[in-house]
Amino acid sequence: MPPNVSLLRVNLMLLGRTANGLYWMNRYIERAENMARLVDAGLRMALTRTEDASGEWHSVVVSAGSDAAFANRNTEYSAATVTDFLLRDTSNPSSVMSSMETARNNARMVRTALTRETWESINEAWMALKRMLAAPIDDRELPAVLDRIKRETALIRGAFYGTMLRNEIFDFSQLGTYVERADNTARILDVKYYVLLPSISWVGSTMDNYQWESILRSVSAHRSYRWNYEATYRPANIADYLILNGRMPRSLAFCYRFINEHLELLAEDYGQRHACHETAHKTRSLLKAGSIKDIFDSGLHEFLVDFIRDNIRLGDEIAADYSFC
């Protein structure tokens, strides 16, 4: 094998390892925040129920994609068992503590690709959350703990945005953030509409409206929704806001706008397009051309299941196309 070909393969391998570390570092930081937001939504909705709070907590675990793992370790769905599993349990790879541990390990692996401020914010967040989540959380302290988790991840994001050069390091990092965020928003919407609502007779009721409001609060969209729709909580408007509104930072359309942008920048840098570019483009085109009426007419659940499947495929294609290893 010619020496230059061998060197090229080594360089591609190093690129893949660095890209992998950056991508998953940001996915797990986003996942830690998302878990806190899911628990926050479950806490708010459980407070509206006097008879079936366990049903709300069950839906939170389903939304997190952890139902089977949870059932292997617990026999009841309660505030204590669910919050402990999603925030503290290190046997759960998606818990806040596991996510921050994995994010820090990936950050340490790509330490030379990060600014000092970014690395320090990740390390300090990991240490702060490790102390805070060392013991079971008292119910009275849970809201403050959830706010602290969201604040720590926001500080990481601020340090990253404020100090990192806009190059391929930035692009792979942002891909991880937005692929993870899109997955989370889709899962929250799907579980709300098909698990949380106990009866069709509740649609449009005060209880239904409060649950939709809780979903908005869980993705920090409550106030901005009111700016767009005043004070009317309608399922179609809320779904439209979280799926198709390109200016809402946690909407599916917003996520895919930036997924496409960063993939295009990578294509320019490396002079090559891959399968992931086509998949991302198709999804964004679907979101840009669609209407919430069409989505509801064809089935919101079916739309979200297809979206989650395609989003997972996109993540797999990014890993394959850029030689993650």
Image: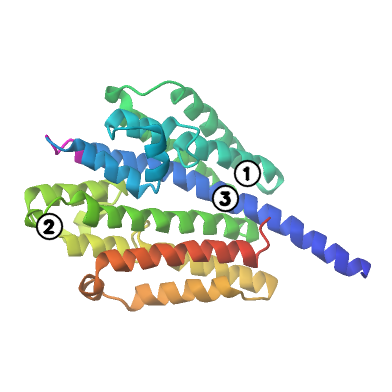
**Which residue is located at x 20 percent, y 41 percent?**
45
Tell me if 286 is positioned left or right of 11 in this view: left
What's under tag 3, amino acid-wise?
A: Trp
Secondary structure mainly formed by the magenta segment: loop
x, y (%) of residue 86? 40, 37
Q: Which residue is mark 2?
A: 232
x, y (%) of residue 137? 36, 24
Mark 3 or mark 1: which comes first in sequence? 3
The mark closer to the camera, 2 or 3, is 3
What's under tag 2, amino acid-wise?
A: Thr
Give residue 24's mark.
Answer: 3
Within 10 Å of disc 2 (Cα), the crowding (few <14, some 14-19, many 20+) is few
**Which residue is located at x 33 percent, y 30 percent?**
81
Magenta span includes 296: no
**Which residue is located at x 39 percent, y 22 percent?**
136
What's under tag 1, amino acid-wise?
A: Asn
Give residue 106's mark.
Answer: 1
Q: Are marks 3 and 1 in contact (CB under 8 Å)?
A: yes
x, y (%) of residue 274? 61, 74
- Quadrant of the rendered structure where residue 124 is? top right
